Amino acid sequence: MKKFLLFAMAFVAFAATAEIESMKARLPTIIDMKSKGLVGEQPDGYLGVIKNEGGAQAVANAENSDRKAEYTKRAAAQGQTVEVLAGVLGEARVRQEKSGRFVRQKDGSWVKN
């Protein structure tokens, strides 16, 4: 049983590192897609697709999967729900997005920041 717990803890640590690394590796693509108006930040904490061109949907899906995994870990550590944490971080991402990039409003419309 002890070996299993150690293995499980090591696997979780590895998975967390893999998610963060995949997010870092994906960042230049996301920045490029944001500058082209293909994807944008949403107040729910996830990346949204504005135009499904150049693999935007696949990139958003991969990023959102990693974000959800990260939000889930952080929410558990903070005693919050994933939705609350994602919303707080999403609204911060929208507020802090660079000028000229698209952000989604709460009414669902996309506007340039």
Image (cartoon, rainbow, N blue to C red):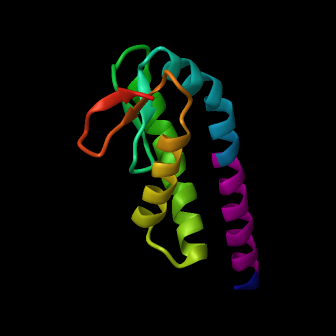
Q: Is residue 30 magenta?
A: no
Foreground: 67 or 97? 97
Where does the image place residue 55, in percent across and percent down from the top left? 43, 20
How many numbered marks appear? 0
Foreground: 34 or 8? 34
Q: Is residue 5 magenta?
A: yes
Where does the image place residue 16, in percent across and percent down from the top left? 67, 56
Query: What is the magenta range?
Result: 3-19
Residue at the bottom extreme, as displayed: 1
* Residue at image location 44% in from the left, 71% down from the top: 81
* Residue at image location 32% in from the left, 30% down from the top: 110
Where does the image place residue 43, in percent across and percent down from the top left? 40, 47
| Quarter of the image where the N terminus is located | bottom right
**Would you place residue 7 above or below residue 18 in this image?**
below
**Residue 107 as seen in the image, left or right of residue 57:** left
Name the main secondary structure of what is drawn in magenta: helix
**Would you place residue 55 above or below residue 25 in this image?**
above
Foreground: 28 or 7? 28
**Residue 85 as seen in the image, left or right of residue 17:** left
* Residue at image location 53% in from the left, 25% down from the top: 99
| Quarter of the image where the C terminus is located | top left
Where does the image place residue 4, in percent across and percent down from the top left? 69, 77
* Residue at image location 46% in from the left, 50% down from the top: 91
Question: Residue 22's image quarter?
Answer: top right
